[in-house]
Image (cartoon, rainbow, N blue to C red):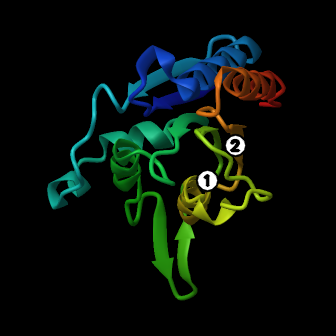
Amino acid sequence: MNILHIDSSISGEASSSRKITAAVVRHLIARHPGAEVIYRDLAADALPHLTLADLADHALVDEFLAADTVVIGAPMYNFTVPTHLKAWLDRLAIAGRTFQYGANGPSGLAGGRKVIVASTRGGFYGPDSPIASYELQDRYLATFFGFIGITDITFLHAEGLALGPEQRDRALKGALEAAERLAV
């Protein structure tokens, strides 16, 4: 098994999404001894905004397509994903490599892999929240990966992280427990 581990939080060791992605990767390695892991810290090694020249460099898309499972730490920043995660995703959407246009519109070419997202948020944005419509993070990621053909997406949520230490601990504990129950 090939695992691509992506972190994007700017919070370093204090990051909840990093704790969750690390737990997921540990779980995967325990279930698949000999798994190979490629790690990218997009906050520490940020990609610049996409340019035309970047479209000719397929190293990141090759790395992505070589993965059986992609584990992504996606904290919510201003209702969506961090810009450096978006810069990475921009490099994955390559016509002819991860999607194609046909007579019936676009179709994804990158299916056959699993994506696991550690989705962390300071507040509550779930379907029962009065501000659920503000949630653009999971919707964007599900739309993006669906566009390139990936439908096997699992979101591990830790919400309400900014509402005090007890809520933060409870949310993180729930997400870590969910990571241990993953059937991958």
Q: Position of residue 117 (x, y in %)?
A: 62, 39
Residue drawn at (52%, 44%) of the image: 76
Mark sitting on residue 53? none
Q: Position of residue 29 (x, y in %)?
A: 67, 15
Residue 135 left/right relative to 175: left
Based on the displayed image, in which of its 4 quarters is residue 22 positioned?
A: top right
Residue drawn at (70%, 24%) of the image: 172
Q: Is label 1 in a helix, a strand or a loop?
A: helix
Neighbours of disc 2 within 10 Å: few (<14), some (14-19), many (20+): some
Based on the displayed image, in which of its 4 quarters is residue 175 positioned?
A: top right
Residue 55 left/right relative to 137: left
Neighbours of disc 1 within 10 Å: few (<14), some (14-19), many (20+): some
Residue drawn at (56%, 29%) of the image: 17
Q: Which residue is mark 2?
A: 155
Residue ranking furthest to the front: 164
Q: Position of residue 116 (x, y in %)?
A: 65, 38
Q: Return the residue nearer the eye: 100 or 152.
A: 152
Residue 71 vertical placement versus 81 (above, below): above
Residue 83 left/right relative to 143: left
Q: Quadrant of the C terminus?
A: top right
Residue ranking furthest to the left: 53
Q: Return the residue nearer the eye: 33 or 45.
A: 45
Q: Is label 2 in a helix, a strand or a loop?
A: strand
Q: CA distance from mark 2 to mark 1?
A: 8 Å
Residue type at mark 2: give it.
Answer: Phe
Kindly indicate whether the residue at mark 1 contacts the one at mark 2 (C-beta within 8 angstroms). Answer: yes
Looking at marks 2 and 1 on the same chain, the residue that comes earlier in the sequence is marked by 1
Q: Position of residue 114 (x, y in %)?
A: 66, 42
Q: Which residue is mark 1?
A: 138
Based on the displayed image, in which of its 4 quarters is residue 71 positioned?
A: top right
Residue 124 vertical placement versus 8 (above, below): below
